[in-house]
Image: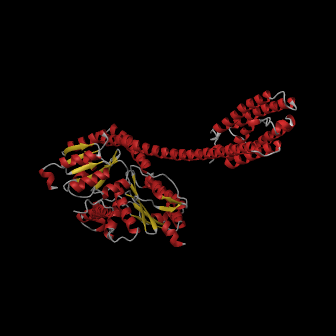
Amino acid sequence: MSPAGRPGRKHPTRPLWRAAVLLRVITLFFAAGVVFTHRGDYANTGLAWGTIGVMAAWTALTFWYYLRAGHGRLWFTIVDLAVCCALMCVSRFALTHEQLTALKVPLLPTVWVTAVVAIGAIRAGALGGAIFGLVVSAFNYGVRGYFDTDLTRDMVLLVGVGIVLGLLSENQVRAAEIAERLAQAMRAEAATAERERLARTIHDGVLQVLARVRKRGRELGGEAAELAELAGHQEVALRALVAAAPLESTSDGHADLRPRLQVLASDRYQVSVPATAVLVAECAATELTFLVREALENVDRHAGPDARAWVLLEDVGDEVVLSVRDDGVGIAAGRIAAAEQEGRLGIARSIRGRVRELGGTISLETAPGAGTEWEIRVPNKRGERGQR
Amino acid sequence: MTAEAERPISVMVVDDHPIWRDGVARDLAERGFDVRATAADASSAVRIARAARPDVVLMDLNLGAESGADATREITAGLPGTRVLVLSASGEHSDVLEAVKAGASGYLVKSASAEELVAAVRRTAAGDAVFTAGLAGLVLGEYRRMAAGPDDAAAPKLTERETEVLRLVAKGRTARQIADRLVLSHRTVENHVQSTLRKLQLHNRVELARYAIEHGLDGDPEQ
């Protein structure tokens, strides 16, 4: 992400642009002073003052333009360079031949042209600065019509300034990018730390108090026991929420099944998982979570008011084994088959069908009074690879 | 259990949260336990446990910046007569597994009732393991992780029977129900469960020692 691309963010080279336009203002006064000094000697004094007028107007325009955006567009800096060179050429008509050669009177823009080299360097880096410096020097030679050490010294200075400022500008942009990346990393770290802090605060404060309320309230009985019951529901839900790892899929389309199941825990439903990630295909994770939720809803509806349930997730070899057991009233033998034949029972059809689609198997163990136990086996990440 | 008849079981409660710590201490004292000490952080827990030598340390795992697992390791390594029961609100996760591998004899969620707590402390004092379904799931997962990893002859393995018992525990069955189902004695089921923990703890100690030797942390080589 480029720093310039962020709205409301200052361009990293902005201070350099400010310095460049300021240099142009200062050198404008110097150029006006030079014309004033030689006012009686020019071939065309009116043209000389006219040139200063155009330079003043151009200085004002560029001052506004460069500072408005914080930086200039490349095409505009090239126009800027062309204007400066054209103004240098005007000197050929305003100065006498003697002034140009023997007397070595400065060209009309004098050092004012340094600013455009600085602008080129800031906009386009060291290479841009060097090119701008060479172009200005070339016009300097051309307008004078001869070579000498003074003009060559000017060229060395102009190109040198272009390179130095260009390097500075490039460095400024790079530093801003690094700072931006660092800031991003710090923001991400702060967000993680905040999440952890929140989890810790919940652990240390809310959960402890809820656990205590639940425990003591249950012992006191009566209305306190009812309150304890409510506190208990919240405690278990909150603990599951805090303990669950973030719900994230890996880049290759697999997901850790554990956090999706852990959030289903309540004071009646316990969820047991391994300490390490259990990876299955993303769609399998969604389906299995749905199946467990459906099985738990069945417990809610049919197993009796005091029934509890346990969900166990195991990662064995090439498959994931998911067991859902309850200690409720159970189902009489043949009731499921009978219901299936009547075409009205949801569990058998939907659960069996879904598991078959995932390439897995399902078994049901139940007896009246002995609860029910579903065991679902589906391929895990290793198992999928083996099948291909 | 005979020790109980002679003298009350001595207990120490380690928890950085005063509401909980004092509540548990009071519950246990009311039920005839000898609450010998309390501590709010891991380092003072180790120090106080050495002086107080309780039968059972009730250890919270979230002790601010410190880890209850490290304190568990130091207490169980230094005091053979003291057992650690983890009592945590943290949910059954890797830190619980870490504490159990470090030598804790069991784990109980903080939402357990006072009766469950008392029973767990008694069982811990008697040398039995205290397993929740969640802990059984973690221990099963740990054995399977080791089995799936690079071939390591030293890595402990579960026998078929132990796997069967642990799976039944993880699905919420009590030791009594498991004994009935597998036609075993209650004692045999307890032994199976305990043995799964003991193998894990032994392996953990061996691993730590091997790590120390490989990294030159085993003291002065001259000695």
Q: Quadrant of residue A161?
A: top right
**Vertical order, A129 against B220 (above or below):** above
Count of numbered circles in the view: 0
Query: Front-most of B170 and A223?
Result: B170
Q: Is residue A276 left or right of residue B20?
A: right
Q: Position of residue A21 (x, y in %)?
A: 70, 35
The residue shown at (37%, 39%) is: A227
| One can see residue B6 in this view | yes
The residue shown at (79%, 27%) is: A36
**Vertical order, B25 against A244 (above or below):** above
The colour scheme applied to this rendered structure is: secondary structure
Q: Position of residue A41 (x, y in %)?
A: 84, 30
Which residue extends farthest front?
A: A102
Q: Position of residue B88 (x, y in %)?
A: 33, 49
Q: Quadrant of residue B15?
A: top left
The residue shown at (87%, 36%) is: A93
Query: Front-most of A263 and A335?
Result: A263
**Vertical order, B126 against A95 (above or below):** below
Which residue extends farthest left?
A: B6
Q: Quadrant of residue A221?
A: top left
Query: Front-most of A250 and A244?
Result: A250
Say which quadrant the C terminus of chain A sits in. bottom right
Q: Position of residue B50 (x, y in %)?
A: 20, 49
| One can see residue A90 in this view | no
Q: Is residue A21 left or right of residue B118?
A: right
